[in-house]
Amino acid sequence: VQLQASGGGLVQAGGSLRLSCAASGRTFSNGVMGWFRQAPGKEREFVAARRWSGGTTSYADSVKGRFTISRDNAKNTAYLQMNSLKPEDTAVYYCAAGYNMILSTMQLIRAYDSWGQGTLVTVSS
């Protein structure tokens, strides 16, 4: 599956952004879509994930209650709604796709097979 991430930009602290990840190619009905981020000088970290079919979601503790992952079947697109943004949310955000995961593996980078190109989110204080 090919992934195209978009929606990043510059926003003030407390603001909101919505990232999109358009999927094409392989049928995604039994897959998992994840969002990860990488801040300058830091390792890539898990943000959120959702099974494409069904409502199972997983969130990093740092974004719980602020970020929401969703998907639009008709558009084959996943979204990451980010509210109450903080300067520490500044990073390049990547979407990723994988298959046949259990809940405990949805946070693992190695569980994902396909990655988008990344979109930069900058939160100013």
Image (spheres, helix red, strand yellow):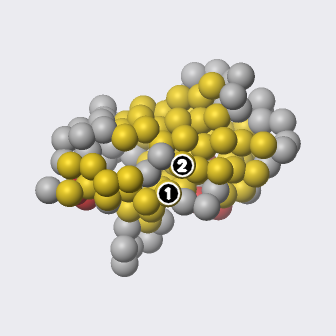
Q: Secondary structure at mark 2?
A: strand
Can the viewer see residue 107 in this picture? no
Q: Residue at x 76, y 51 (%)?
A: 2
Count how many numbered circles sit on residues in the image.
2
Residue farthest toward the left in the current orientation of the protein = 125
- Residue 40 falls in image quadrant: bottom left
The numbered mark at residue 119 is 1
Q: Amino acid at mark 2?
A: Ser
- Horizontal arrangement in the rendering, residue 86 relative to residue 69 (left or right): left
The quadrant of the image that shows the C terminus is: bottom left
| Label 1: how many Cα within 10 Å (few below 14, some 14–19, many 20+) | many
- Residue 66 falls in image quadrant: top left
Residue farthest toward the right in the current orientation of the protein = 26
Q: Secondary structure at mark 1?
A: strand
| Label 2: how many Cα within 10 Å (few below 14, some 14–19, many 20+) | some
Across and down, in percent, residue 95 comes to 58, 51
- Mark 1 and mark 2: Cα distance apart in space: 6 Å
Viewer-nearest residue: 36 or 101:
36
Q: Amino acid at mark 1?
A: Thr
- Horizontal arrangement in the rendering, residue 19 relative to residue 10 (left or right): right
Can the viewer see residue 60 in this picture? yes
- Residue 120 falls in image quadrant: bottom left
Provide the residue designation for mark 2: 6
Q: Residue at x 30, y 32 (%)?
A: 65
Viewer-nearest residue: 32 or 102:
32
- Horizontal arrangement in the rendering, residue 80 relative to residue 116 (left or right): left
Across and down, in percent, residue 48 comes to 48, 43
Q: Residue at x 64, y 21 (%)?
A: 54
Counting residues from the start of the chain, the first of labels 1 and 2 encountered is: 2
Examine the rendered structure and indicate whether residue 96 appears above or below residue 52: below
